Amino acid sequence: MKGTYFLTSESVGKGHPDKVCDQISDAVLDAVLKEDSKGRVACESFISAGLVIVGGEITTKTYVDIHRLVRRVLNDIGYTRQEYGFSAATCAVLNAINAQSPDISQGVDSGGAGDQGIMIGYACDETPELMPLPIMLAHKLVMRIEEVRKKKVLDYLGPDCKSQVTVEYKDGVPQRIDAVVLACQHTEKILDPTGKKITDKARQEIIKEIAHHVLGKLVDKKTKYFVNETGKFVVGGPQSDTGVTGRKIVVDTYGGVVSHGGGAFSGKDPTKVDRSATYMARYVAKNIVAAKLAKKCWIQFGYCIGVAEPVSVMVDTFGTGKVSEEKLVALVRKNFNLTPRGIIEELKLQSPIYEKTAAYGHFGREEFSWENTAKAKALSKDA
């Protein structure tokens, strides 16, 4: 885009109810894959006041103790104190898991995709991670909130939190941060005498220890800060908000900068192209940008259930490509195996790696195989 514009992205912390569900669902997936690398998992979780329900379809040779697993995840997140309104020790856990449909299984067993759908990947050169700046900053803010909470730098913070960052752009280049939104669950310790809002001292501590620590030089005197703007955030987490797996798909991807495909990720084994092909689309897009064949790259794959090869491959470089989109599509098909089996093998997806993807975004984190740029050199050479 030309001229000046403002772009906003949000993230949520591990204690947000939807993210709690994502982590539970992916913890179930990891538990299956740890003992049964070919297990089939489509696990959904639901959380509300005092209750966790784990359901879906799982076919595996192993056994998962759902009750123990759920309580372990909740403990790791930090729901260990009654003042947070939800406790890992006392909540009810309901197991409602069935087996995968044999009609789906027969198509997947032969190497086909586990479902139809469209999968989107994206990369750009505005951050070292080749991700959009707003979503990367939003993730780093909620990471910092967890850090200061667990290290007791701000010992009054609770597990639930959200962040939002608005970046000012000029002619497609980030210039400064215009607005920062922080919503941090907290104890009553930092309420002012009215009991209706946090103290100014606490507000300034949150801005200093979280926002300033993360945002650095992009912040200026005009940057606006919004901290717990309702006044207080004592009642949070599952006590105040129902959570469901897969409800934060824009947080999981690119922060709304580009379109999202049809499905969520968490709780799905890699035969589900909603997950694995979206990881491959990010891998492809990132390698194209790393090869300097484009400054921005958007990829779309289309799949049909039971069919191995994608029914479509589309590339858009938003006018920044050094070669045509048609040429890039040819390069993608030549250099990447886009079948479900090929994707699983290339990205090593039949391992218990998924719980850590379920918070702070699935992309822009070097620990994951789909973030490496091993194909950049070959793409550059073939172009």
Image (cartoon, helix red, strand yellow):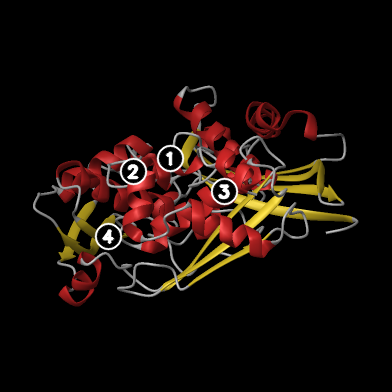
Mark 2–mark 3 Cα distance, whole angstroms, equals 27 Å
Mark 2 nearby-residue class (10 Å; few <14, some 14–19, many ≥20): some
Q: Is residue 347 left or right of residue 360?
A: left
Mark 4–mark 3 Cα distance, whole angstroms, equals 23 Å
Question: Of callouts 3 and 1, which one flags the residue occurring earlier in the amino acid sequence?
Answer: 3
Mark 2–mark 4 Cα distance, whole angstroms, equals 20 Å
**Label 3 secondary element:** strand
Which residue does the numbered mark 1 point to in the structure image? 369
Question: Of callouts 4 and 1, which one flags the residue occurring earlier in the amino acid sequence?
Answer: 4
Please, what is the three-letter code of the amino acid marked with disc 1? Ser
Vertical relation: 66 (above or below) 244: above
Which residue does the numbered mark 4 point to in the structure image? 43
Mark 4–mark 1 Cα distance, whole angstroms, equals 23 Å
Question: Of callouts 2 and 4, which one flags the residue occurring earlier in the amino acid sequence?
Answer: 4
Q: Nearer the viewer, residue 54 or 279?
A: 279
Which residue does the numbered mark 3 point to in the structure image? 11
Mark 3 nearby-residue class (10 Å; few <14, some 14–19, many ≥20): many
Which residue does the numbered mark 2 point to in the structure image? 348
Question: Of callouts 2 and 3, which one flags the residue occurring earlier in the amino acid sequence?
Answer: 3
Q: Position of residue 21 (x, y in %)?
A: 36, 54
Residue at the (84%, 56%) spot, across then down: 5
Please, what is the three-letter code of the amino acid marked with disc 2? Lys
